[in-house]
Image (spheres, rainbow, N blue to C red):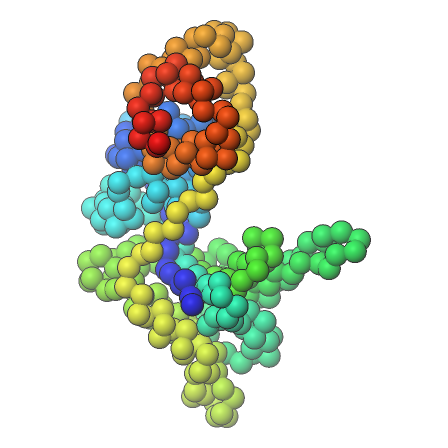
Amino acid sequence: MTDNCILVDWFSATTTIYSPVTLIDYLGLDINSFTDLHGFYGYADRLYFGGISIHYNQRGNDSDKPSVLLEMSGKGCRQFETSSNRTFYDLFDDVLNGEFNITRLDVAYDDIDKNGGTGLLDIKKIARFTLHQRFVSKWGSGQILDSFEVNGNCEPMTHALTIQFGSTKSDIMLRIYDKAQERGGLDYHWVRAEIVLRRERALDFIKNLCTHKMPLGKLYSGVLKNYLRFIRMDHSRRERCTVIGWWDSFLNHADKIKIFTKKEVDYNLSNVCRYVLEQAGNSISVFLSCYGVEELLNQLHKRKSQLNTNQRRLIADFLENHPDCYDDVKETMNILNNPEVLNDLL
């Protein structure tokens, strides 16, 4: 049984329409979830939440309409899908409306088989075909990367193969890599084939998707067919060689997927603790130093935002595993003005 899907794995765009605050509101997110950090790419400041970065205060830009950069990594894309009532199609429509200037868009196909199968894409086979130049491509360059981690003196090294076509500076490139190994060696098959689109190529992709109503799977497959074919060496002229069966099957399978597949962000109590201590820890320390614990609880009591479904689920899971802590949790909920949460959960 497979769990294949196509998803947005990176989105970045600039805007002069929105300020950082109004952009967060546009995205349907809670500004209180964001942390102040240093910016990149010539921006002095950044607001960050779960892989979503909003860069602002561009150095040397004195325009009346300053530029703001929205950047969502793969983690940020999952956070956006999970936390917002908006979709990427909403963002794409507003790119076409001129509200955003798209700078990068990654669209990935996840070839996943959790039941012991080998999936559609064999990463080692792809590496062999690439090494022996059994392909026809519009890309003028490519490389095979073999990263590894040493797990200990008595443990074997963990290898993670990546095959890349095109330059990292070009407007379009392809990256195929072993996602299972990148995640530390999962016990099932997971290979990702990711198209990285920049500037005009990203805009062209969005136009075809939204304006011309081309299904996502067909568009993804069509781009790959146009740029890369792994082949049988059955003709003296490489461009006339037939496409190898496993690559053709993969493209046809991708063609059948018509919509983006929402994937839940990894969200657990460890992530919450890591965020509180690593991301917001210094800010909390400053607040406690200046105002004390009582004022912190008072401000949390007054806050407008409510616990979302995932956060309520974490509390429920915690109580299930620690029933002796019920009274303490109930007291805290009363202090924070959330007594109804326990009633909903129990």
At 60% from the left edge and 66% from the top edge, which residue is drawn? 144
Specify whether 292 is left or right of 152: left
Task: Give the residue drawn at x 44%, y 27%.
Answer: 35
- The percent position of residue 296, horizontal first and vertical second, equals 44, 12
Q: Position of residue 240 (x, y in %)?
A: 43, 88
- With respect to residue 290, does 2 lie above or below? below
Task: Return the x and y of residue 163 as percentages of the image width and height.
Answer: 55, 65
Residue 108 sits above or below residue 42 on the image: below
Q: Of residues 322 and 186, which is closer to you in this image?
A: 322
Q: Against 77, is 61 above or below? A: above
**Residue 129 picture quarter:** bottom right
Left or right for 331, reference 290:
left
Q: Is residue 275 visible?
A: no
Quarter of the image that includes the N terminus: bottom left
Residue 86, by quadrant, is top left
Q: Residue furthest right?
A: 153
Inspect this view and state whether residue 260 appears.
yes
Looking at the image, residue 146 lies above or below residue 82: below
Query: Which residue appears at 57% of the width and 57% of the height?
Result: 186
